[in-house]
Amino acid sequence: MKKKLLVPLLSAFALVFSACSQAGHRAGLAEGESRVITDVWGRQVRIPLEVRTIITLGPGAPRIAAYLNVMDMLAGSEEYNVRNLTALRDYNPVHHERFRTLPLVGAGGGSGNNNAFPEAIVMLAPDVIIAGFERDAADELQAQTGIPVVSVRHRTGLAHESFYAAVRVFAETVGAQTRGEELLSAIDAYKEDLRQRTFAIPEDGRPRVYAGAVTFNGRRGMAGTYSHFGPLAAINAYNVADEAGAEGFIEIDLEQIIIWDPDVIFLDPGNMDLVNHEYQVNPSFFRSLRAVQQGRVYSMPAFNFAGTNITYALINAYFAGTVLFPQEFADIDIAEKAGEILYLFLGENTFDIMASYGLVYGRLTIGE
């Protein structure tokens, strides 16, 4: 019996030793067979001259791989993308079947921490790991595996400048610079189109807007909002939350919303159950708001989920434009514009899939 057990055990050790040897070889690549990438943290990472296989981990990295159309390079997948078919990550419905065929290499998520499965990655021996990790997490995973780790960590928002840097680092790593610049130029063009439509409108001619029930580290009720909110800022909208003085996510006192009394309210349709519960508890608050009285409450689906769905953020901006500035956005059919954006970034129009998961655009009725 001992002899029978010895053969498979030796074979397993041989596989692990072979994979570790390959990883160690890559970590010590000679100059003639390698190049150096500077990642978003300024880390100098030596990688093969030609990268054929990659693993993407953490917030943003799998999404950028989808945007760059290099999903065929993936050697493994995070558990979240394998276990879940969801439109909350714009790329997931398009590539879910591919994810299901790949070995698990990490838990997935938006923390930026090292939640990879090092042993599984070593066995797969990819050329490079591209991760949306913090600096220390990237260093840790590289030490654990002996495989180069390039970080593409970036801030959330409607194409923050750090996103541009992340795309360029990723594209240079895998040799997709042409596609990367095409996408970044398209983002610039969309942002300029949005800006040009409204920049000349005087402040007193712009509706006062509140975006509530936003999703930030979990679901939020009416008080959850953003100042300098990307989709609203892109169309020069008057976001009342900007008066709060802070930047980013804020939990606002409901009395402040009454004082602001916005002309238009946008809410995340995915959090309407929370808002409707709040309505049952405190209906007088909602009934006191002019936007509710006049039926000017609209949807704005969440666009941040383990990084930013740039597609959804752009669609949100165009939809908000049609609501707030109907004359300036009269030529925009939101379904058509969404299809155009989704196809450009993902190679597929998933607008109907978005709707099937509750990511819808239109008027909302609080209390239903």
Image: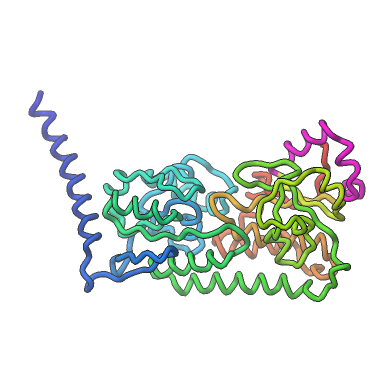
Q: Position of residue 263 (x, y in %)?
A: 87, 55
Residue located at (56% from left, 50% from top): 89
Position of 215 relative to 280 (above/below): below
The reply to whether residue 174 is visible in this rendering is no
The colour scheme is rainbow
Residue located at (22% from left, 65% from top): 29
Residue located at (49% from left, 60% from top): 64
State left or right for residue 291 relative to residue 103.
right
Residue 287 lies in the magenta stretch = yes
- Quadrant occupied by the C terminus: top right
Please, which residue is most extreme toward the top here? 1
Position of 115 relative to 60 (above/below): above
The reply to whether residue 337 is visible in this rendering is yes
Given residues 289 and 94, the one toward you in this image is 289
**Segment tinted magenta in the rendering:** 270-295
Please, which residue is most extreme toward the front here? 245
Position of 148 relative to 49 (above/below): above
Q: Quadrant of residue 246?
A: bottom right
Q: Quadrant of residue 315?
A: bottom right
Please, which residue is most extreme toward the left here? 3
Residue located at (53% from left, 73% from top): 182
